[in-house]
Image: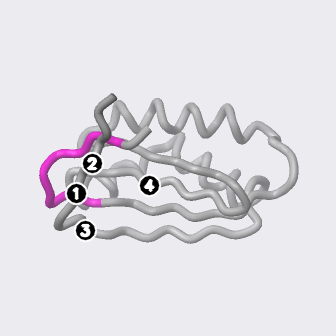
Amino acid sequence: MIAKTPVPPYYAVIFSSVRTEGDNGYSDMADRMVEMAKQQAGFLGVESARDEIGITVSYWRDLNSIKAWKENFEHSIAREKGRNEWYQSFKTRIAKVERDYEFEKAY
């Protein structure tokens, strides 16, 4: 589902990754991280897709909200497991959203 975000400006954290073989607890942890992020101050929404490359974009009110999420203890544990078990490679980008456009077909 496409995240319902407020009128810009806001921030996007773009996490692109290539997974290792097998689940190894990844799916449960990914679900847990989304649920925890939703409780975090400044969280606006998330979108995710996975094929050969996984891309998760989380949206945040400001840079302080992103920093607080990065410093979350459980999120730190998940990041460490990602480095050691779940990802062959990944890259995180942080971008300021200055404009967005929306289209939804009515049925």
Give the label on residue 96, or none: 3
Q: CA distance from mark 4 to mark 3?
A: 12 Å
Q: CA distance from mark 3 to mark 1?
A: 15 Å
Give the SS element for disc 3: strand
Give the label on residue 103, or none: 2
Q: CA distance from mark 4 to mark 2?
A: 19 Å
Q: Is residue 19 magenta?
A: no
Q: Estimate the x, y position of residue 53 in percent, counting from the top left.
A: 67, 62
Q: Quick one: label 2 or label 3, which is nearer the N terminus?
A: 3
Residue beneath label 1, please?
101
Q: Is residue 7 magenta?
A: yes
Amino acid at dot 3: Lys
Give the SS element for disc 1: loop
Amino acid at dot 2: Phe
Determine the image quadrant of residue 67.
bottom left
Instruction: Residue at 55% x, 58% y: name it.
Output: 55
Q: Residues within 10 Å of mark 4 (few under 14, many from 20)?
A: many
Give the label on residue 57, or none: 4
Q: Estimate the x, y position of residue 95 in percent, counting from the top left.
A: 32, 69
Magenta-tinted stretch: 3-11
Q: Quick one: label 3 or label 1, which is nearer the N terminus?
A: 3
Q: Main secondary structure of the magenta part?
A: loop
Give the SS element for disc 2: loop
The mark closer to the camera, 1 or 4, is 1
The mark closer to the camera, 2 or 3, is 2
Instruction: Residue at 24% x, 45% y: name it.
Output: 5
Q: Is residue 88 left or right of residue 33?
A: right
Q: Residue 72, relative to residue 55: is it above or below? A: above
Instruction: Residue at 21% x, 51% y: name it.
Output: 61
